[in-house]
Every structure is written in structure tokens, then in C-alpha cells.
Image (spheres, rainbow, N blue to C red):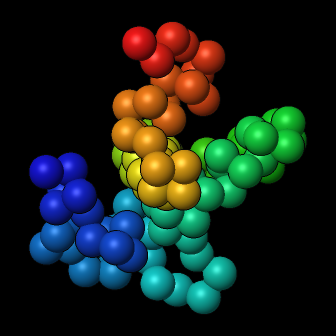
Amino acid sequence: MLRRLFRPDGREPGTTVDESPRGTTKAKGSRNLFEAAATYVAAGAEDDQERMDDAAGWVSPEALSFGVSELACRAVIALARERDESPEQVARTLLGLPTD
């Protein structure tokens, strides 16, 4: 359901480029919510607070949260396929939880 709320370019359905939230237009040098999420998560993995803060400013907090969640889902699915495990097992393992 959430995947239908935003278009792949980060704009909400029915908006034009001019109406898009900050950082989600298609103008040269702009970023969309998925670019923001990818940079934010990669910077977190590299313990780069400055890049995390920068990426967090590209889109609204709600859009960043959605992008990070989407990235997490895709990563867990990819790892589950690679490991031939269920997504739940992979997610629990990554978080250090029991996989009973």
C-alpha cells in the first residue's frame, strides 16, 4: 500500500515538479526520497554523521522514513533470496534476535 503513495521519482501522485516537496524535483542536482534514503543509510553504516545530516535535509522526515523502510524491505528480501531463508529469519538475524 505505501508503495502506491509515492511515485518512483519521489513526487506524490498528482503533483507537478513545481509542487514537489523540497529535494524531490527532477531539476539538475536534486535528490529524490530513494537517493536520500540510500545516502542516509550508507552514511550511517560508515558512521558519517555529516553525510547523514545532509541527506536528511534533501526530503521531508516522512519521505526519508518511507525511503529507509523501503530500502530495508528490499535489502531483507535480497538477503533472504541469497541465503534461501525467510525474510523474517534474515531480519531477526540482522537485529541479533532469536530466529525460533
Residue shown at 58%/75% (left/top)? 30
Residue shown at 37%/67% (left/top)? 10
Q: Quadrant of the C terminus?
A: top left
Percent x, y of residue 83: 54, 49
Identify the image quadrant of residue 48: top right
Viewer-side residue, 57 vs 82: 82
Q: What is the total number of numbered labels drawn onto the structure image?
A: 0
Query: Could you tell whether 13 is left or right of 71 in the image?
Result: left
Identify the image quadrant of residue 86: top left
Q: Is residue 93 above or below residue 19?
A: above
Q: Is residue 59 visible?
A: no
Query: Could you tell whether 38 is left or right of 34 in the image?
Result: right
Residue shown at 65%/81% (left/top)? 29
Percent x, y of residue 8: 34, 73
Query: Could you tell whether 47 is left or right of 88 in the image?
Result: right
Percent x, y of residue 12: 24, 65
Viewer-side residue, 87 vs 59: 87
Q: Is residue 74 above or below residue 44?
A: below
Percent x, y of residue 17: 34, 81
Residue shown at 46%/50% (left/top)? 84
Q: Is residue 46 visible?
A: yes
